[in-house]
Amino acid sequence: MLLTKCTTAIHKIKIMLQPTLTSSARTLARCTAITLASTTVVTTTSLVVYTNTEQGLGLKRELDFWKNVVPIVWDYWWNASFRSPKVELQQYVGDTLSNDAERDEHNDSSSSRRKELLQTLHQRNAPIIFQTMLNLGGLYIKLGQVLSVTALPIPEEYRTHFRTLQSNVPGHEDFESVVKPT
């Protein structure tokens, strides 16, 4: 029935470009909105059901990972990226200083402020990454162990959290309850 109405509305638009156009356009827009809304509801329901099955555990773990990582990436981008609107506005305001002496002083202080900002961001986000690694377990814990001792330029705030993974990893279920003999 809905498909018939949509087809009729499209047909009216093509053939009759008269005052009924607004009525037909409204019908077409309404049909499109209903189709989009129903598709969204069905897709969301299917994903929720799938992630709660045994086959969907991988997808659920991936969604948990991204649910925790995306806000952190956003936090770093918004507060520290030179392309962030917030940072661009701060630079614009800083560039309006009048003389060269003030500009040099501003550049020196902005470098130290940037280091302080990054340290604050690291302190705020390192516990979240650490907890995400613990929740996801396995490979993520091993990654944290490697990052705690590697020569890569990892911020110290992250290293201190990851070092606890060397010896204080929470226990898991008994082997017998995880691996079921056949």
Image: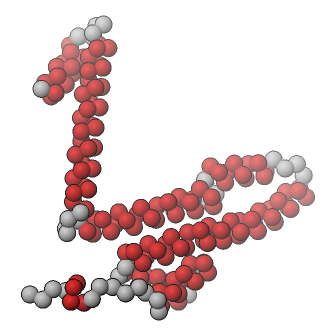
Question: Residue 73: x percent and y percent?
Answer: 51, 62
Quadrant for the C terminus in the image: bottom left
Residue shown at 39% from the left, 74% from the top: 135
Q: Is residue 153 visible?
A: no
Quadrant for the N terminus in the image: top left
Question: Residue 23: x percent and y percent?
Answer: 28, 14
68 left or right, relative to 21: right
The residue nearer to you, when weighing 31 against 133, is 133
Residue shown at 15% from the left, 28% from the top: 3
Question: Residue 97: x percent and y percent?
Answer: 84, 50
Question: Residue 130: x percent and y percent?
Answer: 49, 76
Q: How is the image coloured?
A: secondary structure
Q: In which quarter of the image is residue 75?
A: bottom right
69 left or right, relative to 49: right
Against 61, residue 103 (above or below) is above
74 left or right, relative to 134: right
* Numbered disc total: 0
Q: Is residue 112 visible?
A: yes
Q: In which quarter of the image is residue 156?
A: bottom right
The residue nearer to you, when weighing 131 against 108, is 131
The residue nearer to you, when weighing 180 against 22, is 180
